[in-house]
Image: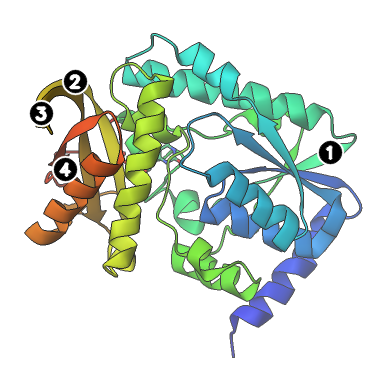
Amino acid sequence: DWTMGAYREEAVARIREQVGDAKVICALSGGVDSSVAAALIHEAVGDQLTCVFVDHGLLRLNEADEVVAMFRDHMNLHVIHAQEQELFLGALEGVSDPETKRKTIGRLFIDVFQKYADQIDGARFLAQGTLYPDVIESVSFSGGPSVTIKSHHNVGGLPEKMGLKLVEPLRELFKDEVRALGRELGLPAHFIGRHPFPGPGLAIRCPGEITRDKLEILRKADAIYIDQIRKHGLYDEIWQAFAAILPMRTVGVMGDGRTYDYALALRAVTSVDGMTADYYPFSHDFLGETATRIINEVKGVNRVFYDCTSKPPGTIELE
Ligand code: XMP
């Protein structure tokens, strides 16, 4: 009689056996997989685990603080909040090519993670939230088939470079099982049900040059869009939804004046595994209301488009 509770105990025992009294480090992204892996390993070896949360300045509104607070205060984990926004945003200045963006972020991520990990004396293991689909390579959010289309962002190659062994306690699980395990471990439901968020973050939702102004606009607009989706009870029907800021300004009119501001694209898709996706058929009322709210509440935006491209031929992210 298989239950998630029994699986949890078994997994904890296996981690203890593998790790012994050595130290473990984990790159916490705030995503479901790395979060559940961290929570499970913490249950097994407690303070032997240190998590590094790399803040690259490309996270959503309040995201870094929420993730760090949850793990530190609610889950009692030891979390290093690596504030490296300036480093990443500086390196991305003037970069508009999508692959260059991804490679720049991926390279810095590894450097930064290594820098913080080096400060943790005697770490011998690196924890990763690898899932069964990643193992069999039919689906992957951190490598796998789509790597030929876009370079994915992960810590590949890092364990060898740092002489660390891997701890991958989710290797036998599918995404829905990881969510169930997360609930079992006491992670909040709203957190477990979160849409996927890519490693390069808002960088790939900001086609063209990334500026702090654009990121600011994007954060506010995305928060309103997601708020609308939640208010209409649609969040759980959607695989992923986000706003993107387009590299163009258009003319509008507001009050007595002419505006010349940014245009946003809203994206929402349904999917089973992220490999293919259909655009989500919002009602016209929803779209109209959301566009109006964003334009009224976010300075610097005067036009909103809805992206009705499926995958293929589009990808889910804009870059
Ligand atoms: P695309 O845009 O390729 O995205 O259709 C498929 C899924 O993968 C996510 N994604 C990433 N996840 N690192 C990640 O961890 C990445 O570099 C990356 N790029 C895309 C994307 O958000 C979607 O869920």
Answer whether labels 1 and 3 touch (C-beta < 8 Å).
no
Which circle, 2 or 3, is nearer the viewer? 3
Q: Residues within 10 Å of mark 2 (few under 14, many from 20)?
A: few
Q: Is residue 58 left or right of residue 21?
A: left
> Residue under circle 4?
312
Give the label on residue 123, or none.
1
Q: In this view of the protein, can residue 129 be seen by the observer?
A: no
Q: Amino acid at mark 1?
A: Ala
Q: Residues within 10 Å of mark 3 (few under 14, many from 20)?
A: few
Q: Residues within 10 Å of mark 1 (few under 14, many from 20)?
A: many
Which circle, 2 or 1, is nearer the viewer? 2
> Residue under circle 3?
256
> Residue under circle 2?
248
Which circle, 4 or 3, is nearer the viewer? 3
Residue at 32% x, 15% y: name it: 97
| x and y percentages locating residue 187 in the rendered image | 61, 67
Instruction: Work out whether residue 289 or residue 118 is closer to the camera in this orientation and state it.
Output: 289
| x and y percentages locating residue 199 in the rendered image | 48, 37
Instruction: Work out whether residue 48 or residue 304 is closer to the camera in this orientation and state it.
Output: 304
